[in-house]
Amino acid sequence: MSQLVDWQIAKLHSDLADGLLSPWDLDMLQPNTVDVKLGDQFDGANGKLLSPDRMMWDGRGRFVFLAPNEFVLGHTVERFSIPEDICARIEGKSTWGRRGLLVHASAGFIDSGFTGQLTLELKNLTDAPIKLLISKPIAQVSFHRLDAIPSRKYGECGNHYQGQMGATPAAS
């Protein structure tokens, strides 16, 4: 398995009929990753969407505060279409990590063949609120070329999240 670099990610995106992710923003391409933006739907730990009154506007954009030690599910703006010979990983951006934000608790791996938005497992590790900026970079995704194509496709193995859109709670 080998990790793709910027020009390989851009070429892969342009070679795919539906692209690698949508919307594609060349400004989000980093040397070894693609930055992804925070979507506007949040699912609380109780399985209910966060109240819309938690969404605020400051004249520069929308945001929501993540309370101290709070955990919620969020999602990326981008929808992914991972080809069968590629897998990916999502990781936090260093700016957010330095503020005490986790973007994934344990589910950072993205299987080959996955399509949909990525669900983020957002956890404030601090004792102060964190202001999450909607439609702004929140995480980064790296892409890895597989040595072989899997014998089964994602979604054929009892996977529950193929095609997910928005903050998707755990499958029962």
Image (cartoon, grey):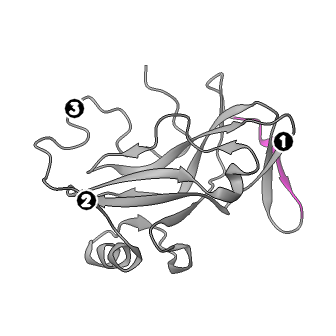
Magenta part of the protein: which range? 50-58
The answer to whether mark 2 and mark 3 are in CB contact below 8 A is: no
Mark 2 or mark 3: name the one nearer the start of the chain: 2
Residue located beneath label 1 in the image: 53
Kind of residue sitting beneath label 1: Asp
Between the C-alphas of marks 2 and 3, the distance is 17 Å
Point out the image quarter for the N terminus.
Answer: bottom left
Label 3: element kind: loop
Number of numbered labels in the structure image:
3
In the rendered image of this protein, does residue 139 appear above or below residue 24? above
Which residue position holds label 3? 157
| Above or below, 150 relative to 140 | above
Which quadrant holds the C terminus? top left
* Picture coordinates of residue 75, whole percent (x, y): 57, 48
Mark 2 touches mark 1? (CB < 8 Å): no
Residue 92 placed where, x, y %?
59, 52
Determine which quarter of the picture holds residue 102: top right
For residue 91, above or below residue 168: below
Disc 1 from disc 3: Cα separation: 39 Å
**Secondary element at image label 2:** loop
Residue sitting nearer the eye, 144 or 134: 144
Identify the residue under disc 2.
Answer: 83
